[in-house]
Amino acid sequence: MQRERTNETSLRVVSKEKDSIIVEMINYDNTLLRTLVEEILKDDQVIEARYYIKHPIIDNPQIYVKVKSGKPQAAIKRSIRKLSKLYEDLGAQVEKEIEKYRSNHIIKTTE
């Protein structure tokens, strides 16, 4: 399918079998998809996970996931939840460090 020309991200199920799924990732960055596939591969129920792009200019990337048991879309959801939690924790840690930096670098003035 030809690449959509908007900035909005979405996805579309291209095909679905009992133990596998192919999902087209519309307007997603390769960096994000690589991280997602790496997380999916950590799942014990996953046999295979990869993403590919037929043509880098006209096609959207697709993710393929095959599982031993369970639903392949569940493996994707589990991985997204784990990454979401990871980035949420990272964001909180950055905020904490910024506050610590600010409190240690306040310029004290005397009147």
Image (tube, grey):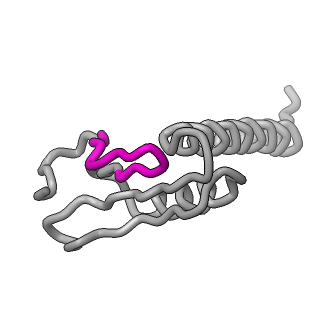
Q: Position of residue 100 (x, y in %)?
A: 85, 40
As rendered, which of 27 and 23 lies closer to the eye? Answer: 23
Q: Position of residue 78 (x, y in %)?
A: 62, 39
Which residue is situated farthest in the bottom direction here?
55
| Quadrant of the drawing holding the N terminus | bottom left
Q: Position of residue 55 (x, y in %)?
A: 20, 73
| Quadrant of the drawing holding the C terminus | top right
What residue is drawn where x is 33% and y is 58%? 62
| Quarter of the view holding residue 101 | top right
As rendered, which of 95 and 74 lies closer to the eye? Answer: 74
Dominant secondary structure, magenta:
strand
Q: Which residues are magenta?
A: 10-22
Q: Is residue 107 visible?
A: no
| 64 in magenta | no
Instruction: Please tell me whether residue 22 is drawn above or below residue 89 in the rendered image.
Output: below
Please state if 34 lies on the left or on the right of 100 as rendered: left
| 11 in magenta | yes
| Quarter of the view holding residue 106 | top right
Please state if 35 lies on the left or on the right of 24 as rendered: right
What residue is drawn where x is 42% and y is 58%? 64
Q: Is residue 92 visible?
A: yes
What residue is drawn where x is 30% and y is 40%? 10
Please state if 109 lies on the left or on the right of 51 as rendered: right
